[in-house]
Amino acid sequence: MENNLSSITSQELLDKDLEQRSLDAICVNESTLQHEWWHNIKYVIVGTLFGIVFIKAEIISWFRIQEMFRFQSFHMYGVIGSAVLVGAISVALIKKFNIKTIYGETIQFHD
């Protein structure tokens, strides 16, 4: 059986790719915008600040993690619960107000 790839259009390949990505649970909301390398500096800054907050809140402390698994402290459960709550509220607000990315792209949620 001969496989004739020249008869497949680029749109068909794109559709097939999107279908495969959705089956593999890979993000299909990828941005199509191309930015210069220095646009990534903002992610380095936010990541660094996020790391500092984790250190100051003792989230990366082995002692706090040990306390959590021994049910001796609520600290880590409070952090995890807060993160889940903030995430759920954020998703609900994005869906309700149809919030777009900072570049104006639509955010889609898939089941």
Image (cartoon, helix red, strand yellow):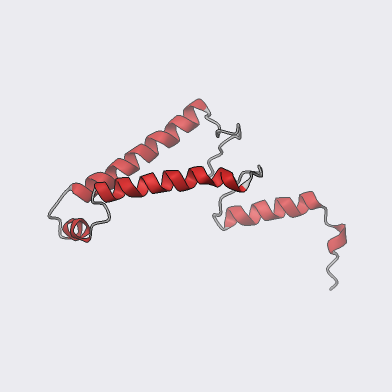
The image shows residue 106 at horizontal and vertical percentages of 59, 34
Q: Is residue 51 left or right of residue 98?
A: left
Q: Nearer the viewer, residue 31 or 2?
A: 31
Q: Position of residue 90 (x, y in %)?
A: 41, 35
Q: Residue furthest top?
A: 97
Please identify the quarter of the rendering in which residue 31 is found: top right
- Give the percent coordinates (x, y) of residue 97: 49, 26
- Please tell me whether residue 107 is drawn above or below residue 28 in the rendered image: above
| Residue 50 in sight | yes
Give the total of numbered labels: 0
Whether residue 111 appears in this view of the structure is no
Please report the residue visible at 60 percent of the width from the left and 31 percent of the height from the top: 104
Residue at horizontal 57%, vertical 43%?
39
Q: Position of residue 105 (x, y in %)?
A: 61, 35
Spot the residue most to the bottom.
Answer: 1
Q: Nearer the viewer, residue 111 or 74?
A: 74
Quadrant of the image occupied by residue 49:
top left
Question: What residue sits 39% from the left and 48% below the top?
Answer: 48
Q: Is 7 placed above or below 28 here? A: below
Locate the N terminus and report the quarter of the image it occupies: bottom right
Q: Is residue 96 above or below residue 35?
A: above
